[in-house]
Each structure stands twice: as C-alpha cells, then as structure tokens.
Image (cartoon, rainbow, N blue to C red):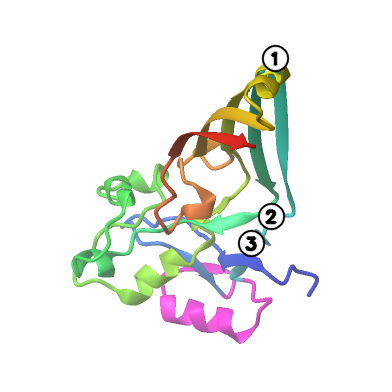
Amino acid sequence: MGKPLYAVAGYTWGGLDANGNPQGYLNGKKSIDYNAIVNEGNASPEAANITYVGSALPTVFGNLVNTFGYKNFSLSVNISYKLGYYFRRPALNYNTLLNGSIGNDQYAQRWQKPGDENSTDVPSFIYPNSTGRDNFYTLSAVNILKGDHVRLQYINLSYGLGRQLLDKWRLKTFQFYANAADLGILWRANKQGLDPEYANAIPPLKSFTIGLRAGF
C-alpha cells in the first residue's frame, strides 16, 4: 500500500556466497534456495525478501529550450530531463548465453575465484545451469538502477535573410537551417553507462539535416 502504480521492486540482495552463488533471503536469513525464496515472495506483496526500490516512471521531468539570436542567426538548443525513477538493467543470464541468443558484458565481471564475491555482484558460471538461479539474479534488486538523466534532444542553427533582401526578392521568409537531433545523454545517475530509456533496445541514431525554408 502507498506505493506508485508503476513501481520497481526486486528480491532483496544478499550478495554472492564463497562459491559465487547469488544470495537472497528466506525467513530473514541468507539463502540460495531459489524456489523457496520465490514462493515466499509470491506469498505476499509485502514479503520481507522483496525490496521496493521506487517509481518506474519519472516523477520530475521536462524540457529546457533556449534560443539565442545574433543579427540574422538563430541558435536553439533543447535539453530534456527525467528524474526520480528507476529501471531494471539487462542482467547476465547464463541460460540465454548457453543457448547462443543473447550475451551480456557482465560476463567479464563474473565471479571466477574465491574472494571475488568481495568485488563483484555477478554470479559465477556453473554447469549444468540453474534456471531458478538465473531468474533470481535477473529479478534481484541489485540490477535496479537510478534512471535519472539529462538528454540533449536537438540543436538547430538557422540564418534568415534580412527584410531588405526579402522585399527586394518579394519573399515573406527565406531561411537556411541545420539541425542535429537525438544527440544522446549529457548526464546520467547510473555508473554503468546505460541509457535508461533504451536499456533493452537500440537507441535512435543521431540525425543531421540541412535545408532551407522559403515563403512567397
């Protein structure tokens, strides 16, 4: 109760054990009994082994559009911001990796030897693989990150003819322009370099346009 309609939650994270297994909580104690952890979490939305992290939708957002003019030149810059929300990052899943479908750069950060549990949260590779182990790690709170970011939406530079030339050529408007859009993120809260809006998809490509507008 009292949580946002669109919220992000995950299994409470207990770190890795000495063998690189991800740990959750069962009856208040660290455990690697993943089926039992899931059953306890499913028994109640307020289960102790579930951690509510925050809103899945930005709670503060908007755009800042600034236009600068000098003589016949005009420069417009659009910066958007989305703050106060969280997203689930793509996590390493050994089952999909073994099936040859989807890789993940977390593989290079995985537990490989005793002591690695002190410096990484990425589970060790085991064979045969455990689907329950994979699912628990994927849905754990350790893979939920802050989504706050500031994005440069576009830059537009234009040059318009002065009134004297417009009248001479019998034009209402005549303007050259250059536009650059989808320029990427200026700042993000997460330290993994992920784009919160395209964590599971390919972001749009930068686009560049040059043209002119004329009105008679």
Which residue carries the number 1 mark? 70
Q: Nearer the viewer, residue 3 or 60?
A: 60
Q: Label 3: how many residues lie within 10 Å, few (<14), some (14-19) or many (20+)? A: some
Task: Provide residue 54's location: percent of width, then percent of height.
Answer: 68, 59
Q: Where's residue 8, x and y in %?
A: 61, 65
The type of residue carrying mark 2 is Pro
- Name the residue tied to disc 2: 58
Describe residue 15's horizontal placement relative to residue 155 as left or right: left
Name the residue rendered at 66%, 79% in the picture: 45
Q: Secondary structure at mark 2?
A: loop
* Extent of the magenta region: 27-48
Mark carried by residue 101: none
Q: Answer yes or no: is residue 187 visible.
A: no
Residue at 68% across, 18% down: 162
Q: Residue at coordinates 74% horizontally, 68% vertically from top-left?
A: 4
Image coordinates of residue 100 in percent, x first then y, are 19, 65
Instruction: Examine the rendered structure and indicate whether residue 33 appears above or below residue 157.
Output: below
Q: Tell which residue pokes out farthest to the top in this image.
A: 71
Which residue in the protein does label 3 denote?
56
Mark 1: amino acid: Tyr
- In primary-sequence order, the first of circles 1 and 3 is 3
Quick check: is 35 in the magenta stretch? yes
User: Residue type at mark 3?
Assistant: Ala
The quarter of the rendered structure image containing the C terminus is top right
Q: Nearer the viewer, mark 1 or mark 2?
A: 1
Residue at screen point 24% across, 63% down: 97
Depicted 115 relative to depicted 45: above or below:
above
